[in-house]
Amino acid sequence: MTGVSTDHPASPDDGLAAVVALRRLADRLEDAEVERALRDGWTWSQVAEALAVTRQAVHKKHARRLR
Amino acid sequence: MFERFTADARQVVERAEREARFSGSPSIEAEHLLLALACGSGPVAHTLQGCGLDFDRTRAAIDDHFERTLAAIGIDAGGFALPPAPPSANPRFGASSKLALERALRAAAERKDRRLRSEHVLLGVLRAEAGTVPRVLAAEGVERDAIIARLERELAA
């Protein structure tokens, strides 16, 4: 994984687009990591705590896809 | 909401849903509508293809846009070695696609068209001034205003 540099977006348009792209990346990363954790034997409660969200939230978001 | 849509326009919405689902997106966004409009052989797809936006190019342009946007803030998305996105379970309409469809309805109402056609959907997608789609189009050198003007002329004819 690479780090984040201190580059600052040149304009609000660039900055807001960066937020959208980051959310999309975070969603994809979350999908992949939740799936990996469950495969490795983590419980939904452990995954939820690691993500700092409620068990209900993580279950609602991922259970249908991963069953 | 969809009862006034022509069969073509309905297909565009269904195709956009499929694009969102199979790209693993939790929501259907305006770029999924753009992708749906670019595929097939109808007049709207033809218009987009005439600007260089065939389906494959459009998909690549959207991916390039996100990659470039992350690179601009120092993030190498390739460095995450993400597996291919698993299909999402039930993508809902996101804010950008809702806005595009509202604009499409308005475009139809403006010319008192009773049916909402895929031309209106394209107009609705193109009329966005901010967000992913206008940035993708600008990066591809597509003249948004020119296509809008052409579509409006065609719809008036």
Image: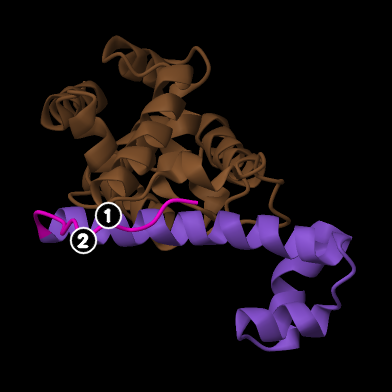
Q: Amino acid at mark 2?
A: Thr
Towards the viewer: B95 or A34: A34
The hue of chain B in the figure is brown
Label 1: chain?
A
Chain label for disc 2? A
Q: Nearer the viewer, residue A40 or A55?
A: A40
Q: Which residue is mark 2?
A: A6
Across the whole image, how many numbered discs are drawn on residues? Answer: 2
Identify the residue at image location x=22%, y=47%: B110
Q: Is residue B37 above or below residue B73?
A: above
Residue interval drawn in magenta: A1-11
Can residue B116 be spotted in the picture? no
Residue B6 is situated, as x and y percent measured from the top left of the image, at 52, 35
Q: Position of residue B32 (x, y in %)?
A: 48, 41
Depth check, mark 1 against mark 2: the one in front is 2
Residue under label 1: A17
Instruction: Tell me if I can see residue B137 in this picture.
Output: yes
Eyeballing the image, is A58 above or below B46? below
Residue at the spot 32% in from the left edge and 16% down from the top edge: B47
Q: Secondary structure at mark 2?
A: loop
Q: Is residue B130 left or right of residue B92?
A: left
Q: Quadrant of residue A33?
A: bottom right
Cα–Cα span, label 1 and label 2? 17 Å
Image vertical order of residue A61 relative to residue B83, above or below = below
Sequence-earlier tag: 1 or 2:
2
**Residue A25 belongs to magenta span:** no
Identify which amino acid the numbered label 1 is placed on.
Answer: Ala
Q: Identify the chain drawn in purple.
A: A
- At mark 1, the secondary structure is helix
